[in-house]
Image (cartoon, rainbow, N blue to C red):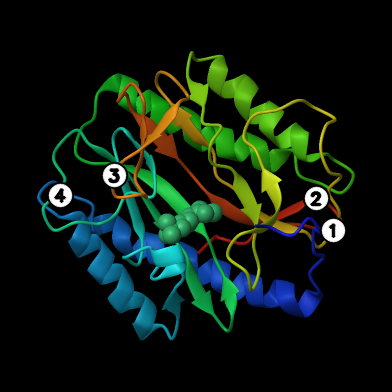
Amino acid sequence: MKTETIVILSQREIEKMRRAGRLAAQLLQHLEPLVKPGVSTLQLNDEAERWTQQHGAKSAPLGYKGYPKSICTSVNEVICHGIPNAKQILKDGDIINIDVTPIIDGYHGDTSKTFLVGNPSPKAQKLVEVTAECLRLGIAEVKPGAKIGDIGAAIQEYAESFGFSVVRDFVGHGISHIFHTAPDVPHYGIRGRGKKLRAGMVFTIEPMINEGTHEAQMLNDGWTAVTSDRQLSAQFEHTIAVTEYGVEILTLP
Ligand code: MF3
Ligand code: CO
Ligand code: CO
C-alpha cells in the first residue's frame, strides 16, 4: 500500500538519485551489446547482477516482494515483469524490454528500454519507435504547475493515433529510498486532472504500449504480465525529477 503523500526530495537526496540514475543507465548501456540471437535471458540477468555488484550497488528487484531475479526481461507479448530464464533464448525478430533498478547509497535508479533482436517486423519496429516517443512526450509535459494527467494524456493521444493501446494495469511511480511510492503516474488520462507537479518530486514514467488490446493477463508464475491477445507490447522507462525550470532525466548515462 502506497502512502498518499508525495515527498519533495532535498537537493542532497536528488544528488543521490542522480548517482543511482546514472548507474542504472550505464547498466542498460552495458547490457545492450549482449542482446543478440542465441543469448538467454538468464545470461542477461547474470551479467547485470555481476556488473551491479562490481559497481558497489544492489539489484532492487532481487527479493522484492519475492521476485526471484535481478532484472526484468519482457519478450514480445510480455508487457512487464518477465522473469529471466535459462531456457528462454532470444531469436531473430524478437523485441525485449530490459528493466533495471540498481540501489546505490540507499537510492534507486529505475530505467528500461526495448531492444530489437536482429530484424523484427516493420510493425514491431514501429511499435518500439512509437513507445520511445511516448516516453519522450510524457517527459516533455513535466514542469512545476503541470498536472499528472497531462503526462498520461500526451502519451495516450500519441499511442492511439497509431492504433496502439496504453496499458492500464501498470503505472509509473514515485521513487527514492523506496522503490515504489506515491504518486501513481498513469500513462493514459485527461489534461488538467490529477495532482499538481512541484519541484523536487521524483517519479518514473514508463509507458507500456500494445499493438492490440490494452488488456493484461497474469501468468501462473505470479509475475509475468502478458497481453490478453498475445500481440506485442513495448516499454521505455526513465526516472525523472521535477525541477524549478522543468524536468531533469536522472537515468541518463
Ligand atoms: N522496475 C520495475 C518498475 O519499473 C519494477 C520491477 S519489480 C520486480 O517499476 F519485482 F518485478 F522486479
Ligand atoms: Co523499471
Ligand atoms: Co518503475
Residue 80, given in percent of the width and then of the height, sits at: 40, 44
Determine whether 62 is above or below 232 in the image: below
- Would you name the residue on which mark 3 appears? 220
Q: Residues within 10 Å of mark 1 (few under 14, many from 20)?
A: some
Q: Amino acid at mark 4?
A: Gln
Q: Residue at x 72, y 71 (%)?
A: 14
**Label whose residue precedes the other's in the sequence (3 or 4):** 4
**Label whose residue precedes the other's in the sequence (4 or 2):** 4
> What element does badge 1 sit on?
loop
**Label whose residue precedes the other's in the sequence (1 or 4):** 4
Q: Is residue 64 visible?
A: yes
Q: Amino acid at mark 1?
A: Ala
Q: Is residue 204 visible?
A: no
Residue 108, given in percent of the width and then of the height, sits at: 56, 70
Q: Nearer the viewer, residue 81 or 97?
A: 81
- Would you name the residue on which mark 1 appears? 199
Q: Is mark 3 within 8 Å of ligand 1?
A: no
Q: Residues within 10 Å of mark 2 (few under 14, many from 20)?
A: some
Residue 143, given in percent of the width and then of the height, sits at: 81, 46
**Label whose residue precedes the other's in the sequence (1 or 2):** 1
Q: Residue at x 54, y 41 (%)?
A: 170
Snapshot quadrant of residue 127: top left
Q: Amino acid at mark 3?
A: Asn
Mark 2 and mark 3: span between their CA atoms? 42 Å
- CB atoms of marks 1 and 2 within 8 Å: no
Mark 4 and mark 2: span between their CA atoms? 41 Å
- Would you name the residue on which mark 2 appears? 246
In this rendering, the label closer to the viewer, 1 or 4: 4
In this rendering, the label closer to the viewer, 3 or 4: 3
Ligand 3: which quarter?
bottom right
Q: Amino acid at mark 2?
A: Gly
Q: Is residue 132 left or right of residue 105?
A: left
